Image (spheres, helix red, strand yellow):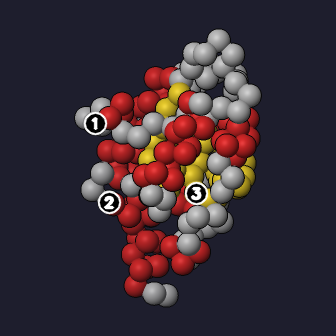
């Protein structure tokens, strides 16, 4: 096992333990972070935030319609959710991972096929507050671990997480697609 792969596994393990413990908030202002919004056919016809009835798969379909490099990954269920958060109080009600073909295979060597570092993940919550709390928690946990940092885009109950392997401009395409 290469040193880089070993380090990634250790850091990912530490982060997984941290992500399992709680969904708290950090001191960072989520509005100062990149924010992703997607739309092809508006799921929010009134122009407001995403409705709470939207699913992660619907959001990803819209995103991949605007960002051609995005391809669906794994639909997360309560049975295969590594974080054991699906459907728990104040946690996501649907989640799907995606890949982005602009990320080099060498950057993600050794990662699970559904790891969000391969592209990202769409998580949908029961409320905008829960989505924001999840985003703030992840950002607070990864703040001191640049290898796990990611772009976050919020739209109502939707959190789109995008891999740090993409450039800010590439990640911004997801934001434009989410809010477009």
| Residue that label 2 marks | 145
**Which element carries disc 1, helix, strand or loop?**
loop
Left or right of 137 on screen, residue 90: right
**Which element carries disc 2, helix, strand or loop?**
loop
Residue 25 appears anywhere in the view: no
- In the image, residue 105 sits, relative to residue 142, either above or below, namely below
Residue 133 appears anywhere in the view: yes
Residue 137: x and y in percent read 38, 40
| Residue that label 1 marks | 28
Query: Tags 3 and 2 in contact by the CB under 8 Å rule?
Result: no
Nearer-the-camera pick, 32 or 69: 69
Q: Residue at x 42, y 52 (%)?
A: 168
Q: CA distance from mark 2 to mark 1?
A: 15 Å
Q: Residues within 10 Å of mark 3 (few under 14, many from 20)?
A: many
Q: Kindly identify which numbered label has been placed on residue 119.
A: 3
Q: Residue at x 61, y 67 (%)?
A: 112
Mark 3 or 2: the one toward you:
3
Left or right of 122 on screen, residue 132: left
- In the image, residue 152 sits, relative to residue 156, either above or below, namely below
Quadrant of the rendered structure where residue 17 is?
Answer: bottom left
């Amino acid at each position: 096992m290469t040193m880089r792969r070993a380090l990634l596994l250790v850091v990912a393990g530490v982060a997984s333990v941290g992500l399992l413990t709680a969904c708290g908030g950090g001191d960072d202002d989520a509005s100062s972070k990149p924010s992703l919004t997607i739309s092809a056919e508006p799921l929010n016809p009134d122009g407001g935030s995403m409705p709470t009835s939207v699913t992660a798969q619907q959001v990803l379909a819209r995103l991949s319609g605007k960002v051609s490099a995005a391809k669906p990954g794994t639909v997360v269920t309560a049975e295969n959710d590594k974080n054991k958060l699906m459907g728990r109080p104040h946690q996501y009600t649907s989640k799907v991972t995606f890949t982005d073909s602009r990320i080099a295979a060498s950057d993600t060597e050794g990662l699970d096929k559904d790891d969000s570092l391969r592209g990202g993940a769409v998580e949908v919550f029961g409320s905008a507050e829960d989505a924001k709390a999840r985003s703030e928690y992840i950002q607070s946990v990864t703040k001191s671990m640049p290898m796990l940092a990611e772009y976050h885009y919020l739209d109502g109950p939707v959190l789109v997480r995008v891999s740090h392997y993409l450039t800010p401009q590439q990640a911004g395409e997801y934001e434009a697609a989410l809010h477009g």
